[in-house]
Amino acid sequence: MDRTLRAARVATFVYFVLCGTLIGTWVVNIPAVEERVGISHATLGGLLVVLGLGAFAGMQVAGPLTDRLGARVVVPASGVLCSATLVLPGLPRDPWTLAAALLLFGFANGCLDVAMNAHAVHVEKAYGRPVMSAFHATFSVGGVLAALVAAAVASTDVGPAVGMGATGALGVAVALAAARALLPAAPPATGTAEEAEHAPVSGGGNARRRIWGLAALAMMVMLCEGAANDWSALHLKDVLDASATVAAFGYGTFAATMTVGRLTADRLAVRVGPAAILRYGAATAAVGIAIVSLAPWTWAALLGWGLFGLGLSGCIPQLFSAAGHADPAAAGANVSRVAGLGYIGMLAGPAVIGWLTHVVPLDEAFLLLLLLCVTVSAAAGILRTTAADRAREKVPSGH
């Protein structure tokens, strides 16, 4: 494989780790920022919506910009901007200033998210085989790094701005250092004919309708992810009376199996095709959340959350990849549409489940997630665009 392409792949890993580290640094500093500003949980919830709106706006700007200027320009610029704005939420002492800081940081994070995913699509096209899931797995590595840095900073008893500023400064250096290895434009596929056969392909004349179909599925999947992030630990604690320590393993199990799944999904996609990853992954997630909803014991709930994370792990990478490959000239714009609607789902997930708990118990509210997973599994054929895909899945062509 060409050294330039390998370097571009490594650089893409770097930006995914960087993005995960930056957003993770904010997340682990939320309690300290909340205390510094002196706001309630309810006010903080509203401010987090502002961050989400900023991220959505950034995604819509960065997508077309990446198509126009190239990832080599937009990815490092977004990385620098996201790193530089990380310190802003650690500085305010009033809610309005914090809202402005979160809006700017969210915008920058949205830009980096879409730009690096668009570049990942170009790298995948050049490799001629699926590599997207591994990139998403390394995003989680960034979250782990953020937690370790936050723990070290907390032991020094300094304010959140110091740790966030230091991480941001390092992020600026990393973003600039990795820029040179990025691909200048969307390259032609260089893999073998067999490898190219396994890569996602264009949706043809129905590309625009297909993109919005992918976006709708991404919204469902990421709504499930968002719900798991915020409600898995609370489910174990409130429904099954688990201790705080055991309850933490709810999210830990979900996150661990999702990371493992993303590290293995690329190889599976080569063998069975992206549609199979989406179909059987969503089906596995449906089984997992059904177990969670019905589980009378803690160990059964942990098993369910593990299956839920494992099943969802490969879904979003396949959807992002398909969006980017639908039209190489508009990869950034298409990824921004799918990621943007998906991000809305991520933000809505916790709120939707929370609203449902006013009507039904928490474990029964999870049945909505079951319905969404079943829908995604049934609609996975949107990724099965060629006869070769159907043959890999061993599904009749009329299916």
Image (cartoon, rainbow, N blue to C red):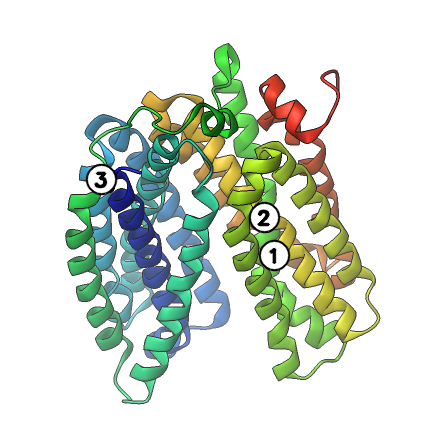
Residue bearing mark 3: 4
Residue bearing mark 2: 223
- Separation (CA) of disc 2 from disc 1: 6 Å
User: Vertical placement of 211 versus 372: above or below?
Assistant: above
Residue at the (44%, 66%) spot, across then down: 44
User: Vertical placement of 79 versus 342: above or below?
Assistant: below
Q: Residues within 10 Å of mark 2 (few under 14, many from 20)?
A: many
Amino acid beneath label 2:
Leu
Query: Where residue 291 sits: x, y (%)?
Result: 79, 59
Residue bearing mark 1: 227
Query: With 379 as the anchor, is 8 left or right in this view?
Result: left
Report the mark closest to the observer, 2 or 3: 3
> Which of disc 1 and disc 3 is earlier in sequence?
3
SS at mark 1?
Answer: helix
Query: Where residue 63 sits: x, y (%)?
Result: 32, 33
Query: Where residue 191 sits: x, y (%)?
Result: 38, 29
> Which of disc 3 and disc 2 is earlier in sequence?
3
- Separation (CA) of disc 2 from disc 3: 37 Å
SS at mark 3?
Answer: helix
Residues at discs 2 and 3 in contact (Cβ within 8 Å): no
Residue at the (46%, 30%) spot, across then down: 195
Query: Where residue 23 sits: x, y (%)?
Result: 36, 60
